[in-house]
Image (spheres, helix red, strand yellow):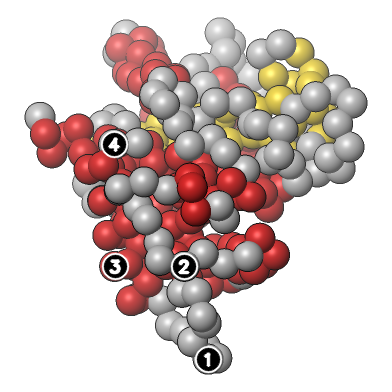
Amino acid sequence: MSSQEWKLVYSTIRLVNRSIPRTGRRPVYPDTLIVAMYLWSVAHDRPMLWATQRCNYGGAFRPRRLPSCSQFYRRIATLRCQALLHGVHERLAGTLDQPGFLMIDGRSFAVGKYTTDSDAAVGYAKDGFVHGYKLHAIATLDGRFTHFQVQPLNVAEQKVAYELIHLARPRGILLGDRGYDSRRLSEFTLRHGALLFTPLPKNAGGGHHRYCAPRAAVKKIWDCGAGQEIIKKRNAIERYFGQLSAFGGGLAPLPAWVRRLPRVRRWITAKIIIYHARLRTRNAAA
């Protein structure tokens, strides 16, 4: 992470911290320090213990005092620190303020076959059935992951899609692969302001049941020959998933010390924050 990216991340932490109400007495080590320490360790692909050692800080970030390991572990798991992390993501990722093309998809993260992680469920990935987790996300055409969830690998994509669409309230056209082709999901997406556009089976509309309105609209687009050009835009989310890992400190396979669902969610959230900081810094320099 460059110094400019870190300055953006740290200033966003301080800004978001002011908007989150505090209960109880003021802690000795502020939440801004705890979250910054965690993001510093994630950016360097190091475990949390590494962040409690003063020798691992440089000119870009050099705290005056550091909490003990037990304090750091306990504080980063508190609700306020979690809210602070998610607030930083929302601030850097932006919102879906303009109608247009959006994409929904998932990326799998496998763990070892003989893992003792009870949260890592068995599900289907590119290499077959493996233990692990999955990142489900809605992305914009300019590369922002505005809404996402991390679930065990056995949770169906369509089930998570309902929650993401309910939170995101997308407007325009939501592009997905064949795994999202569903009558109920299409109707649900339309009620929330968007048209779910997916590849359709060859016999689409040829059965005994009438197509629902949104799927009928998608079929008309495919029949007129424009469907192939539209669905090509969905390939962008595959590139953005790749770009999440295409830089130092990016979202590579889960390291050995990131196990159990809360830790995996926190780690992936931090990686996406770093990605958005890098994206904003590059766009500002362009």
Note whether residue 268 is visible: no
Amino acid type of the residue tagged 1 in the rendering = Arg
The residue indicated by pointer 3 is 15
Kindly report which numbered mark, 4 or 2, lies closer to the viewer in this rendering. 2
**Mark 1 or 2, nearer chain start:** 1
Q: Amino acid at mark 2?
A: Arg
For badge 3, the amino acid type reads Leu
Q: Which residue is mark 1?
A: 25
Name the residue carrying label 4.
Answer: 2
Residue 278 horizontal/vertical position (percent): 29, 36
Of the residues tagged 4 and 3, which is closer to the observer?
A: 4
Can residue 130 be seen from the camera position used here?
yes
Task: Work out whether residue 106 or residue 190 is closer to the camera in this orientation and state it.
Answer: 106
Q: Which residue lies at the image location 26% right of the left edge and 51% below the top edge? A: 7
Label 4 amino acid? Ser
| Number of callouts | 4
Q: Give the farthest residue toward the left.
A: 286
- Which label's residue is closer to the chain start, 4 or 1? 4
Report if the CB atoms under discs 4 and 1 are less than 8 Å apart.
no
Q: Answer with mark 4 or mark 2, whichever residue precedes in sequence.
A: 4
**With 258 as the anchor, is 146 left or right in this view?**
left
Q: Does residue 238 sit above or below 30 in this rendering?
A: above
